[in-house]
Image (tube, rainbow, N blue to C red):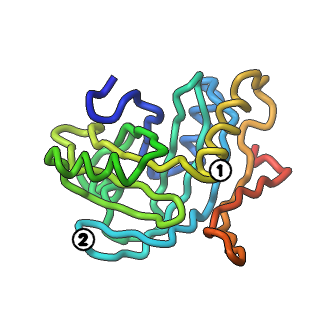
Amino acid sequence: MNRFFGKVNQNGYVVRDIDAALKHWTEVMGVGPFYYVESVPIDYFSYKGVSQDLEISVALGNTGDLQIELIQQRNDAPSVYLDFLEAGHEGLQHMSYWTKTYQEDYDRALANGFQVGQIGGEQGRFVYFDTETHPGTIIEMSDISGSKGEFFEHIRKAAINWDGRHPIRMARYSFEKTKNKIPGGQIIFGNKSRI
């Protein structure tokens, strides 16, 4: 248990080839199913205080209550993912803590001396604190108060009785703007597996 953020909810792996990583995790590690978002829409992203146009693919699956996130960056926008790869690393890059009180927890982290490495998503807020003293020790905090939390719970439940069939399931995230409501995200699942 982390004294600032609680329990680790996710281990995030930065990879060069997400297809190879998915094959390894589903066939060798036996983890799944994974929900694959080929092009993650990020409505806001900043790296070290400078706005960037980040393009990433993400796959999410669970082993028990721990979510495994696979991330492949698709462009050369500055990010902690690119820093990790350019330093010659691949694999576990961060641990993520989830919260439904994001702003309160974010403010508390800053008051305790945490520095922001990258931050993003007005619709699905997340922050990566600059905590890496050796590879794999970045701390992410992610807001799960909206549809992202519902999506994560769907992934956790899908893993409970997974029988190995349909190991990779296509999904996409879209931002839905509705009149007189706070904009929210919608998860759309495809009915085709990649494998």
Vertical order, 163 against 140 (above or below): above
Report x, y in % for residue 59: 59, 47
Q: Amino acid at mark 2?
A: Gly
Give the total number of marks visible in the rendering.
2
Quarter of the image with the C terminus is: top right
Q: Which residue matches tag 1? A: 36
Q: Which residue matches tag 2? A: 49
Seen from the viewer's position, the closer of residues 48 and 143 is 143
Q: Is residue 53 left or right of residue 116?
A: right
- The crowding category of the residue bearing disc 1, from other C-alpha atoms within 10 Å (few below 14, some 14 to 19, many at least 20), is many
Q: Is residue 178 left or right of residue 120?
A: right
Q: Amino acid at mark 1?
A: Tyr
Seen from the viewer's position, the closer of residues 119 and 183 is 183
What residue sits 71% from the left and 54% below the top? 171
What residue sits 68% from the left and 75% below the top? 180
- The crowding category of the residue bearing disc 2, from other C-alpha atoms within 10 Å (few below 14, some 14 to 19, many at least 20), is few
Q: Nearer the viewer, mark 1 or mark 2?
A: 2
Regarding mark 1 in the picture, which secondary structure is present there? strand
Report x, y in % for residue 144: 53, 47
Q: Is residue 148 left or right of residue 111?
A: right
What residue sits 43% from the left and 46% below the top? 101
Report x, y in % for residue 62: 60, 31
Quarter of the image with the N terminus is: top left
